[in-house]
Image (cartoon, rainbow, N blue to C red):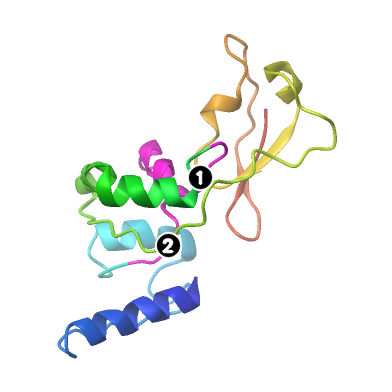
Amino acid sequence: MGESADRLAQSITAMSGGRLDVTVYPANTLARAFETFEAVSAEAADMYHSADNYFGSKSPASDLYFAFPYGMTADELNAWIGFGGGQALYDEVDAPFNIKPLFCMNTGVQMGGRFTKEVNTAEDFKGLVLLHAGSRPQGIAPHGRHRREHSGRRNHDGAQIRRH
């Protein structure tokens, strides 16, 4: 995301005729990687550039704006944000945290999974270990069945590993 953040900073400076000068700081400089949301909310930083699904514990609705299993394609998500009321809802989701969201990038829908065995029914998910960023994938749990969960642990890129 570093190059994208740099391009955004350059664009803001250019569009403002030089009146606004955005400095991009490396991860862990102003705030630790997964604390950027809190830093901006508390006004310790002016903005962050990240995927909001890493902050799904603040508001599970934030997962709607980034890649999640069986979600919208990149074009569908861009259209919804730009023309279908998605930006207004995004504003409402982040308003309690003193954050004005700006949709800057889109990775599109996440794969439903790469599995070592064929998955055809909800029952086939039982016992699988799922790797995903953000909040747990609510729709994958079999309906009406108890789901055993272990607390998530972070891997190198912040994704969560959970057993379902």
Q: Position of residue 163 (x, y in %)?
A: 69, 32
Give the residue displayed 63% in from the left and 19% down from the top.
147
Q: Position of residue 29 (x, y in %)?
A: 43, 77
Q: Secondary structure at mark 2?
A: loop
Instruction: Write down the residue under mark 1.
Output: 134
Find the magenta span and give its range.
Answer: 48-70
Give the residue displayed 65% in from the left and 54% down from the top.
155
Front residue (pair 68, 36): 68
Front residue (pair 59, 10): 10
**Amino acid type, residue under disc 1 in the picture:** Gly
Work out whether 97 lies above or below 18.
above
Give the residue displayed 84% in from the left and 37% down from the top.
116
Label 1 and label 2: CA atoms lie apart by 17 Å
- Residue situated furthest bottom in the rendering: 18
Q: Position of residue 76 (x, y in %)?
A: 42, 45
Instruction: Write down the residue under mark 2.
Output: 105
Magenta stretch: includes residue 57: yes
**From the viewer's perspective, is 118 left or right of 20?**
right
**Amino acid type, residue under disc 2 in the picture:** Met
